Image: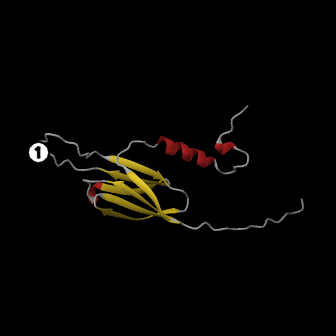
Amino acid sequence: MTKLALGTHPFLLGFEQLERLVERTAKSGNEGYPPYNIEQTSENSYRITLAVAGFAEADLAITVEDSALVIRGRQSDDSEGRVFLHRGIAGRQFQRSFVLADGVDVGEAVMENGLLHVDLTRAEPERIVQTINIKKG
């Protein structure tokens, strides 16, 4: 019995990119830092919230690259001259990627109490009915 890949199924024409998208999502780091939430705020809007305590707005970069929302954080090293007996607060750099579906737009980003909120909206899909004329051959 031959196993058909998702993008090669005969009823899924034009969905080859979906299989690549699933593979890319699976390969993105499953590292747990920083922790995040994804919530649906309305029928067509979402909010991603990252716990970025210790990061300033200038330490964070938010970009959309190749249909993915990419959030990067890099803190400057301010420990010079300080002696830590214990250093348990994470201050490492990170990159967190979220694959966006077609029609999802990134809205505003807000820092509040050590949380970075990024709002997303999804456009209503247009329902188009197209009639195809048949020509005599």
Image quarter of the N terminus: top right
Please say which color scheme the image uses: secondary structure
Judged left or right of residue 55, residue 69 is right
Q: Quadrant of the C terminus?
A: bottom right
Q: Residue at x 61, y 66 (%)?
A: 125
Residue 61 in the figure: left or right of residue 119: left
Viewer-closest of 119 and 68: 119
Q: Dot 1 surroundings within 10 Å: few (below 14), some, or many (20 or more)?
A: few
Identify which residue is drawn at 28% across, 50% down: 74
Q: Nearer the viewer, residue 110 or 35?
A: 35
Q: Secondary structure at mark 1?
A: loop
Q: Where residue 118 sits: x, y (%)? A: 40, 61
User: Left or right: where does residue 39 sit relative to residue 129?
Assistant: left
Q: Is residue 25 above or below residue 121?
A: above
Most distant residue in the top direction? 1
In the image, is residue 83 above or below residue 124?
above
Q: Nearer the viewer, residue 132 or 122?
A: 122
* Disc 1 target residue: 82
Q: Position of residue 50 (x, y in %)?
A: 36, 54
- Residue 60: x %, y % from top left: 31, 55
From the top left corner, tell me how far across and down residue 71 is, in percent.
Answer: 38, 53
Determine whether 4 is above or below 94 in the image: above
Residue shown at 82% from the left, 66% from the top: 133
- The three-letter code of the residue at mark 1 reads Arg
From this view, report whether residue 48 is shown above or below residue 74: below
